[in-house]
């Protein structure tokens, strides 16, 4: 896919952050947009802001609910006459120890971060195949490249997205499908994800005395804007990249894991103790 002009792009989590930035960037490139978010007010606001620039539809969708995602895919295909790209961007965060993470929070996170990607991929795949010019973008994380203390649940979901997308890409190539797939690994992006994150008191076992008050410390490490992330994602689709690393922190973590595939854990643990 060398151009997004007149392509139909479906984006989950489009009410804020990277999803909203993608919507704006794609409108600039002449794409037609199908936006969804669990927060109906924010996705409606995004759509309303772009209606004078392109064709856009918006719908409240909980990506953890398979029936809602499949129904949305059918609605998109009927409203826009098909779909060329799906960007499975919706995601949430959970900070907790591996031992103490509440199972309800773990299930909540996996439902959105992992099952949301599966639902979006499977629901839109028939329409992407029919377009004969399709692309699937699944947003993982730099935490889909390396394990981080206090992020076991988030790591699990993002490692899963990475593995699923890499396997999918190979299957599409083997079958000769006119559809491709890219795994996206952002570092710290300035979005609202931490504000909506669940932070569990089990972090005290790792030395964080005030888990809820740690949001500000983490947010200060987020350096890349959502707009820059969106730009890099769209460039990766145009170049048909298998993987895209966003931000210097993502590139540094990727390099560390390549240099020390298991040794990086001791380094990260030492840095984490100092930070905590």
Image (cartoon, rainbow, N blue to C red):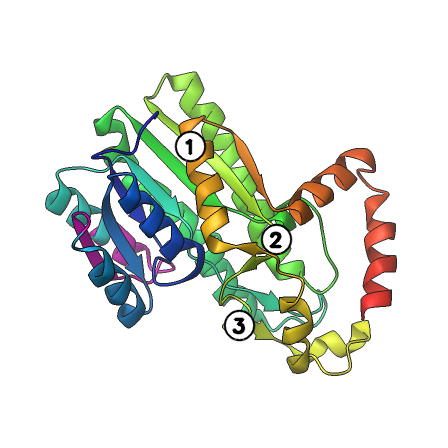
User: Foreground residue, 243 or 54?
Assistant: 54
Residue density around tag 3, few if under 14, some if 14–19, many if 20 or more, within 10 Å: few
The disc, 3 or 1, on the residue closer to the chain's N-terminal end is: 3
User: Foreground residue, 226 or 132?
Assistant: 226
The span from disc 3 to disc 1 (Cα, nearest Å) is: 35 Å
For disc 3, the marked residue is: 104
**Mark 2 or 1, closer to the camera:** 1
Question: Seen in the image, is 212 located left or right of residue 44?
Answer: right
Question: Is residue 6 placed above or below 239 in the rendered structure?
Answer: below
**Which quadrant is the N terminus positioned in?**
top left
**Mark 3 or 1, closer to the camera:** 1
The secondary structure type at the circle numbered 1 is helix
For disc 1, the marked residue is: 237
| Labelled disc at residue 156 | 2
Question: What's the residue at 72%, 45% (across, down)?
Answer: 253
Q: Which residues are magenta?
A: 53-71
Question: What's the residue at 62%, 60% (across, down)?
Answer: 222
Is residue 68 within the magenta segment?
yes
Q: Position of residue 59 (x, y in %)?
A: 22, 60
Mark 2 touches mark 1? (CB < 8 Å): no
The secondary structure type at the circle numbered 2 is helix
Mark 3 touches mark 2? (CB < 8 Å): no
| Labelled disc at residue 74 | none
**Mark 3 or 2, closer to the camera:** 2
Would residue 192 be seen by someone viewing this image from the given angle?
Answer: yes
The disc, 3 or 2, on the residue closer to the chain's N-terminal end is: 3
């Amino acid at each position: 896919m060398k151009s997004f002009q007149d392509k139909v792009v479906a984006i989950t989590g489009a009410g804020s952050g990277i999803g909203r930035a993608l919507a704006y960037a794609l409108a600039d490139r002449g794409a037609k947009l199908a936006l969804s978010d669990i927060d109906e007010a924010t996705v409606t606001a995004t759509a309303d802001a772009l209606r004078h620039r392109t064709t856009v539809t918006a719908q409240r969708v909980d990506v953890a609910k398979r029936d809602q995602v499949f129904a949305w895919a059918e609605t998109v295909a009927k409203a826009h006459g098909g779909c060329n790209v799906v960007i499975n961007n919706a995601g949430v965060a959970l900070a907790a120890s591996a031992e103490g993470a509440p199972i309800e929070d773990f299930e909540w996170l996996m439902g959105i971060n992992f099952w949301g990607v599966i639902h979006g991929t499977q629901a839109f795949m028939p329409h992407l195949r029919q377009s004969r010019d399709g692309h699937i973008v699944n947003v993982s994380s730099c935490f889909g490249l390396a394990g981080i203390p206090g992020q076991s649940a988030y790591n699990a979901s993002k490692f899963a997205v990475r593995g699923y997308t890499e396997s999918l890409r190979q299957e599409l190539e083997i079958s000769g499908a006119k559809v491709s797939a890219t795994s996206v690994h952002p570092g710290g992006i300035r979005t609202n994800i931490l504000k909506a994150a669940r932070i569990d008191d089990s972090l005290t076992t790792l030395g964080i005395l005030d888990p809820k008050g740690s949001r500000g410390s983490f947010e200060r490490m987020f350096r890349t804007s959502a707009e820059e992330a969106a730009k890099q994602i769209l460039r990766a689709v145009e170049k048909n990249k298998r993987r895209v690393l966003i931000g210097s922190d993502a590139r540094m973590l990727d390099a560390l894991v390549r240099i020390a595939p298991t040794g990086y854990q001791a380094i990260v643990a030492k840095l984490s103790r100092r930070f905590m």
